[in-house]
Image (cartoon, helix red, strand yellow):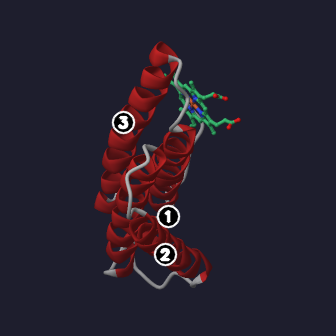
Amino acid sequence: MPSVSHLFFRAGILFLLVGIGLGLAMSITQVHDVIGAHAHINLLGWVTSAIFGGYYALNPAKAEGLLPRIHFWLYTAGVVIMSASLYLLLKQTPGMEPFVAAGSLLTAAGILIATWVIFAPSTASAPTARILPAE
Ligand code: HEM
């Protein structure tokens, strides 16, 4: 599996731990005040990261070069900044809006790079992964 896939899965599972931690905390306390942070951490942090990791694992040629790494770092930094500041915003911390906006824009920039990677023709030498039937 390409290293950028490992990076996406490692970041993703950490997001899932935090995301379900928030979900459990909301369930136990019965205070559902941070649903927005919980949902975004789980869906952008875990589900989408795992889809990106799976995409690069199935298309190793697309995982070569600098762009996939820029994709990973931009996207992950965006989700971390957006989720943390959204959580604090929902906890009524003043002054969080610019951080939520900056994190959201970084996340969106990461997704734009993903769009470029997915649409670009693959020129690299690595073969495309093939799933073979079990014998
Ligand atoms: C141990 C695991 C989890 C627990 C205990 C948990 C708990 C919760 C709770 C208490 C709410 C608030 C419900 C409400 O007030 O309407 C919620 C909402 C939500 N959760 Fe989770 N959750 C868990 C895992 C996940 C996962 C893995 C995902 C996504 C991959 C997810 C996505 C969502 C979404 C999208 C909402 C918002 C639903 C809405 O607004 O209607 N949750 N969760």
**Which residue in the structure is indicated by mark 2?**
105
Q: Assess disc 2: are there few (<14), some (14-19) or many (≥20) residues with their C-alpha within 10 Å of its C-alpha.
A: some
Relative to 57, 77 lies left or right: left
- State how far apart marks 2 and 1 are (Cα): 27 Å
The span from disc 3 to disc 2 (Cα, nearest Å) is: 22 Å
15 vs 93, nearest the viewer: 93
Which quadrant of the frame does ligand 1 lie within?
top right
Location of residue 16 (image quadrant): top left
Q: Quadrant of residue 24?
A: top left
Tag 1, which secondary structure? loop
Residue 70 drawn above or below residue 12? below
Label 1 neighbour load within 10 Å: few <14, some 14-19, many 20+: many
Instruction: Name which of mark 1 and mark 3 comes first in the sequence.
Output: 3
Residue with the mark numbered 3: 18
**Type of amino acid under label 1:** Asn
Q: Amino acid at mark 2?
A: Leu
Q: Can residue 1 be spotted in the picture? A: no
Q: Amino acid at mark 3?
A: Val
Q: Position of residue 117 (x, y in %)?
A: 52, 78
Instruction: Report the front residue among 42 and 83.
Output: 83
Q: How far across and how far down the image is residue 29, in percent?
A: 46, 17
Q: Which of the pair 112/125 is nearer the observer?
A: 112
Q: Does any atom of ligand 1 lie closer than 8 Å to the CB of label 1? A: no
Which x, y percent locates residue 11? 33, 49
